[in-house]
């Protein structure tokens, strides 16, 4: 190494890390948002299936979805869960809708709103 290049490795390291660290953190944050979205979708679908049997009530769907979200994620994601009756292809169905906000920058910062829906066909008496 010549005398004029002494210390250049440190500068190169800092320049590369300034690009690499935000990229890695962004990928991790994207993974967190996708995990929350997929978990909310699974909880909404399972909640809808809980309200599909004949003797089930809409509260069963909300309780099941809330329990899954609280167990898997956290209480703050289980705040807005709504259940309604709907039709799917002319058949009676249950729709569970979960709305939550996920921080876009780490654990703090502005939030990204997410909405997950789950549907299930209700059983009918023959």
Image (spheres, rainbow, N blue to C red):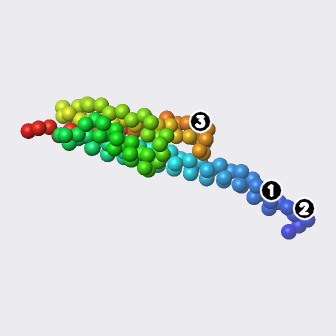
Query: Given the current orientation, which residue lies at the most extreme right position?
Result: 3
Q: Earlier in the sequence, mark 2 or mark 3?
A: 2
Q: Is residue 97 left or right of residue 32?
A: left
Residue 118, picture quadrant: top left
Residue at the disc numbered 1 = 11
Where disc 2 sits, the SS reads helix
Q: Earlier in the sequence, mark 1 or mark 2?
A: 2
For marks 1 and 2, give the CA distance. Answer: 13 Å
Residue 101, position as x, y percentages in the image: 50, 37
Residue 90, picture quadrant: top left
Q: Is residue 106 left or right of residue 83?
A: right
Q: Is residue 103 left or right of residue 120?
A: right
Residue at the disc numbered 3 = 110
Graded by Cα atoms within 10 Å as few (under 14), some (14 to 19) or many (20 or more), the crowding at tag 2 reads: few
Residue 52, position as x, y percentages in the image: 23, 41
Residue at the disc numbered 2 = 4
Q: Residue at x 32, y 33 (%)?
A: 83
Which quadrant, please, contains the N terminus?
Answer: bottom right
Looking at the image, is 15 positioned above or below residue 94?
Answer: below
Marks 3,1: beta carbons within 8 A: no
Which quadrant, please, contains the C terminus?
Answer: top left
Q: Is residue 120 left or right of residue 11?
A: left
For marks 3 and 1, give the CA distance. Answer: 33 Å
Q: Nearer the viewer, residue 8 or 38?
A: 38
């Amino acid at each position: 190494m010549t005398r004029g290049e002494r210390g250049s490795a440190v500068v190169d390291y800092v320049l590369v890390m300034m690009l690499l660290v935000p990229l890695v953190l962004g990928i991790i944050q994207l993974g967190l948002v996708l995990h929350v979205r997929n978990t909310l979708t699974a909880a909404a679908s399972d909640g809808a299936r809980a309200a599909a049997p004949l003797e089930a009530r809409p509260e069963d769907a909300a309780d099941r979805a809330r329990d899954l979200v609280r167990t898997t994620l956290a209480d703050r994601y289980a705040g807005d869960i709504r259940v309604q009756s709907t039709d799917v292809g002319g058949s009676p169905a249950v729709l569970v809708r979960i709305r939550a906000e996920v921080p876009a920058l780490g654990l703090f910062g502005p939030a990204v709103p997410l909405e997950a829906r789950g549907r299930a066909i209700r059983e009918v008496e023959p």
